[in-house]
Amino acid sequence: MILKHKLCVPTPEGENERYAYVYLPKAAENEPSRRFPVLYMFDGHNVFYDEDATYGKSWGLGEYLDKSSLPLIVAAVECNHDPDGARIREYAPYDFHDRRLGDIVGCGRQTMDWLVKSFKPMIDANFPTLPDREHTFIAGSSMGGLMSLYALTEYSQVFSRAAALSPSIDFGAAKLDALLRGADFPAGTVLYMDYGENEMHRRRGMDRRWRTVNRILLQKGVLLTSRIVPAGEHCEASWERQNPFFLPALLYGMED
């Protein structure tokens, strides 16, 4: 079951109304006393429904979870669709300059503070969650993948596991590396991270960036699953095909 409702998210420009999506596993209906881990996701409009997705194709996550019967709640919030790079600013953990985008003022901390201090408490109060760190995960793609890395690093007291699909690790590379090197990841921190073979070939220097970020994470003791997706592209259709990889990685070793 997927519930969809509107909420207001604070931005530097003021309140921004958008949709939040909450997926409840079938077991939540059959076992009313049972509680479940929660996966928070960025770009919620692209997660469940093709008709809501930016480019007409979603991750089809609801169908996959129903078929696989994974015991997981998913709470996903739509991004800021305002023009002039609002999504990139919202999902940028820090300020950076890009030759195509220009100067970006990152609002990622404000985004995460709202998610942790407002959205998560609302989810915990209204749904059968396991609210502790061990059972709280986060995931996203592209800029949402970068934010998932940021959340696992700077909000490690809240999130124990994350998935970053095609993360934008080339934006503000030096700042990201410093952030990761300075992080104190608690023991048992889990990260799934992947990048598409085809998108890797199209982004100059991305192979070096990939090796650098992977090396830092391993040196910091993160339990890392790292994949180059054969023929993978930078799009929802490709990310949907990773559902059978990143979701079991997040839940690996946990009781049913």
Image: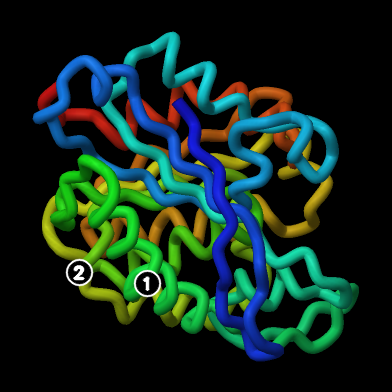
The mark closer to the camera, 2 or 1, is: 1
The percent coordinates of residue 253 (x first, y second) are 15, 29
On the rendered image, what quadrant is the C terminus found in?
A: top left
Left or right of 61 on screen, residue 68: left
Q: Residue at x 44, y 61 (%)?
A: 149
Q: Residue at x 41, y 51 (%)?
A: 40
The front one of 159 and 66 is: 66
Left or right of 127 on screen, residue 1: right
Q: What's the amino acid at mark 1?
A: Ser
Q: What's the amino acid at mark 2?
A: Gln
Q: Quadrant of residue 48?
A: top right
The front one of 155 and 153 is: 155
**Tag 2 residue:** 157
Q: State the scheme by which the image is colored.
A: rainbow
| Label 1 Cα crowd, 10 Å radius (few <14 / some 14-19 / many 20+) | few
**Mark 2 residue element:** loop
Q: Residue at x 57, y 81 (%)?
A: 10
